[in-house]
Image: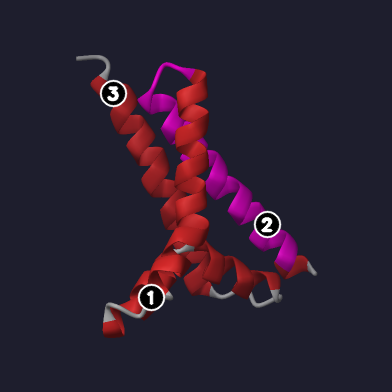
Amino acid sequence: MWGSYIGLLFLGAAFVSIGIFASSITDNQVVSFILALFLCFFIFIGFDFMSSFALFGKIDNVILALGINSHYVSMSRGVVDTRDVIYFVSLIAVFILGTRTVLESRKW
């Protein structure tokens, strides 16, 4: 049960960081909402969908590992693995750094 709560916390933090990034790209709130929704959907389900085609051979496992769903399912079972934690922390860090870069570029 606690693993599921921890996984949900990481999933929420990842979605919030994606939403903040999308909000920093545009000034329009509706556009940023739609962009954040698309990015969250693609990262959650898109990588699983792309790997199910079996077009890339051995790279399909790598594509599957890039998506949030496989890491969240692993954590929701109660297994808090360091690979999953590192994945979520790095995903959050990438989008927060992207937000910082976009906001700093507005100063120029």
Q: Earlier in the sequence, mark 1 or mark 2?
A: 2
Label 1 or label 2, whichever lies nearer to me, is 1
What SS does tag 3 mark?
Answer: helix
Cβ atoms under marks 1 and 2 closer than 8 Å: no
Label 2 or label 3, whichever lies nearer to me, is 2
Q: Position of residue 11 (x, y in %)?
A: 60, 54
3D distance between C-alphas at marks 3 and 1: 39 Å
Magenta residue span:
4-28
What SS does tag 2 mark?
Answer: helix
Please rate how many residues cluster around mark 2, counting C-alpha atoms within 10 Å: few if below 14, some from 14 to 19, many from 20. some
Q: Earlier in the sequence, mark 2 or mark 3?
A: 2
Q: Which residue is mark 2?
A: 8
Question: What is the number of the mark on residue 104?
Answer: 3
**Magenta: predominant secondary structure element?**
helix
What SS does tag 1 mark?
Answer: loop
3D distance between C-alphas at marks 1 and 2: 28 Å
Tell me the residue at 43%/32% (across/down): 22
- Mark 2 residue type: Leu
- Mark 1 residue type: Phe
Please rate how many residues cluster around mark 3, counting C-alpha atoms within 10 Å: few if below 14, some from 14 to 19, many from 20. few
Q: 94 or 64, which lies in front?
A: 64
Outermost residue on the right side: it is 1
Q: Which residue is mark 1?
A: 53
Tell me the residue at 70%/76% (across/down): 77
Question: What is the number of the mark on residue 88?
Answer: none
Cβ atoms under marks 2 and 3 closer than 8 Å: no
The quarter of the rendered structure image containing the C terminus is top left
Asked whether residue 88 is in view, the answer is no
Label 3 or label 1, whichever lies nearer to me, is 1
Q: Position of residue 100 (x, y in %)?
A: 35, 31
